[in-house]
């Protein structure tokens, strides 16, 4: 499967407390898609810009949608701009797609819920491949999981594995920056809401 689908499956089984946020995961999923497009040679980077290559129609429908959504006019799109645009509600999109493919099943409860329906990974070959990739400490998957706060990676190393590819490193860094920006927005809204509530509450 794609890196994004592997990441989603790992997030579903992480049992993180607090749960992985949909917004954070959506940004990381967009980053995973971009790294897969880079690996396939269908995009490159020029500094912080995503440079399109030849059009691509992979077997993975969502990755195909990502490829079709690449901006093909100069000055092209910044990596972080891509994350925000492509990442909008992307975790819900992946949840729906994986449910349709039989990779997720509904459950009555649990600690992690990504959306209105509570779901969990089904014991399929795809899930085993994702877990195997995670347990082997595949650098891209571990780095993206770390960006959304998923702990419990490979136990034989306390350090996050390095990324050999400069473009992938830039994407992961942009995911971190976007998630930090999203958290700053959340904190600002919390402060504003608290201040508004205090005004109504009075002295």
Image: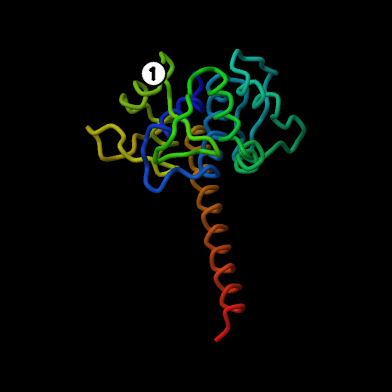
In the picture as drawn, the residue positioned furthest to the left comes out as 156
Say which residue appears at 43% left-offset and 39% top-offset.
Answer: 112
Q: Which residue is most to the right?
A: 73
Q: Quadrant of residue 100?
A: top right
Q: How is the image coloured?
A: rainbow
Residue 93, percent from left and from top: 60, 31
Give the image location of residue 160, x and y in percent. 33, 38
* Residue 187 % position (x, y): 52, 61
- Per the image, the residue denoted by label 1 is 123
Q: Image quadrant of residue 123? A: top left
Of residue 73 and residue 121, the one placed in the foreground of this image is: 121
- In this rendering, position of residue 203 left or right of residue 131: right
Residue 142 makes an appearance in the image: yes
Q: Is residue 170 visible?
A: no
Residue 134 vs 181, above or below: the answer is above
Identify which residue, 157 or 87, lies in the foreground: 87
Label 1 environment density (alpha carbons within 10 Å; few <14, some 14–19, many ≥20): few
Q: Residue at x 49, y 43 (%)?
A: 173
- The C terminus lies in which quarter of the figure? bottom right
Question: Where is residue 2 shown, x and y percent of the image?
Answer: 51, 21
Residue 195 versus residue 34 in the image, above or below = below
Left or right: where 112 falls relative to 61: left
- Residue situated furthest bottom in the rendering: 203
* Picture quadrant where residue 190 is located: bottom right
Numbered disc 1: secondary structure: loop
Count of all numbered marks drawn on residues in the image: 1
20 vs 181, left or right, is: left
């Amino acid at each position: 499967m794609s890196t994004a689908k592997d990441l989603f499956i790992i997030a579903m089984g992480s049992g993180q407390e607090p749960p992985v946020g949909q917004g954070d995961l959506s940004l990381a999923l967009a980053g995973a898609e971009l790294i897969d497009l880079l690996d396939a040679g269908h995009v490159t980077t020029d500094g912080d810009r995503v440079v399109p290559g030849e059009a691509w129609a992979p077997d993975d429908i969502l990755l195909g949608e990502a490829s079709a959504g690449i901006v093909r006019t100069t000055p092209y799109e910044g990596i972080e701009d891509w994350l925000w645009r492509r990442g909008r509600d992307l975790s819900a999109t992946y949840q729906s797609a994986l449910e349709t493919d039989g990779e997720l099943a509904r459950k009555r409860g649990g600690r992690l819920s990504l959306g209105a329906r509570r779901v969990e990974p089904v014991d399929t070959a795809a899930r085993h491949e994702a877990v195997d990739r995670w347990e082997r400490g595949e650098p891209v998957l571990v780095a993206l999981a770390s960006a959304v706060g998923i702990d419990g990676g490979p136990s034989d190393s306390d350090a996050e594995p390095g990324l050999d590819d400069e473009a992938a490193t830039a994407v992961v860094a942009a995911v971190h920056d976007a998630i930090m920006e999203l958290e700053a927005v959340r904190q600002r809204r919390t402060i504003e809401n608290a201040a508004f509530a205090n005004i109504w509450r009075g002295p």
